[in-house]
Amino acid sequence: MQKGSRLRKIARLDIKSEKLLKPIRAEGLRDLGLAEDFSRFYYEEGVDEIIVVDVVASLYQRDPIWSVLRSISNHCYIPITYCGGIRSMKHVEEAIMNGADKVAVNTYAIESPAIIKAISRVYGSQCAIVMIDAKKVENGWECYVDGGREKTDVRVLDWVKKVQDIGAGGIFLNSVDQDGVRNGMDMELVDAVTAVVSIPVVVSGGIGSISHVDKVLKSSGVSGLACASALHYGDITVEQFIMRN
């Protein structure tokens, strides 16, 4: 985060069809209600952005369900990032047509990094976001795909440098180990990634209290913070979240 800039406060919506879910370490999906209702609430309460993540599209190898993205974008007039099941430029085009401002690619980017360059060339680098589900391994972190379930043998720090070089305009970094457990973020991971790239990094996974938000605020390289469970369950109010600087 550049000196004097404000950390973007982002609501993360993990979805399966029209329902909002919250996995714990990529497992144990819990149905919390309609994603559209949560998105409307977060928008009206003043979050800066929304990230919509279809947590099973890549795992099931199915196309994204565009009607959910469309229903969210119809009443949320803030930037929306869509992630989940993107496997072609046609999918990217459909995401934009249905209201996404940015598209985040994880599984298919690992399989075919050329899609990052293509998104950047056609829609601008600000649209080309790479999502990374990172899991702690010996001597670092590994990228996981298919909703954080499958290992890749790709090292996170190598990958973030590569995607920056080929045109990614930002990184959406999620800690699989901390995701949904609400006991704090993997700040070692956050600091390691932000130290080796200059593009914006949005971080997610582990926020459970306002003190965890404060720790992220002290990390000068972070551009945005995406919060899910702590907001969904009321551990942090939206007002507390967006006003913390």
Image: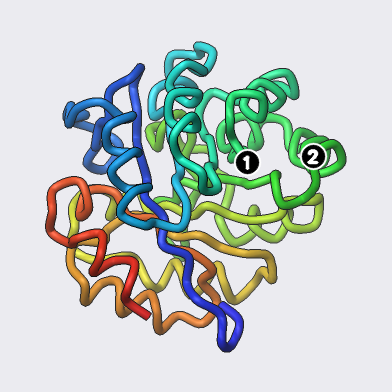
User: Which of the pair 31/47 is nearer the observer?
Assistant: 47
**Callout 1–callout 2 Cβ contact below 8 Å:** no
- Helix, strand or loop at label 2? It is helix
Residue 62 location (% of width, % of height): 50, 11
Give how far across and how far down residue 229 sits, in percent: 22, 48
Dot 1: element? loop
Q: Is residue 51 at all visible to an observer of this figure?
A: yes
Mark 1 or mark 2: name the one nearer the start of the chain. Answer: 1
Identify which residue, 116 or 37, lies in the foreground.
37
Q: Which mark is residue 101?
A: 1
Name the kind of residue labelled 2 in the image: Tyr
At 18% from the left edge and 62% from the top edge, which residue is drawn? 236
Name the residue located 44 percent from the left edge and 46 percent from the top edge: 50
How many numbered tags mark residues here? Answer: 2
Q: Inspect this view and state whether residue 137 appears.
A: no
> For the residue marked with disc 1, what is the amino acid?
Asp
Q: Quadrant of the C terminus?
A: bottom left
Q: Is residue 142 left or right of residue 198?
A: left
Residue occupying image coordinates x 59% and y 35%: 100
Residue corresponding to mark 2: 123
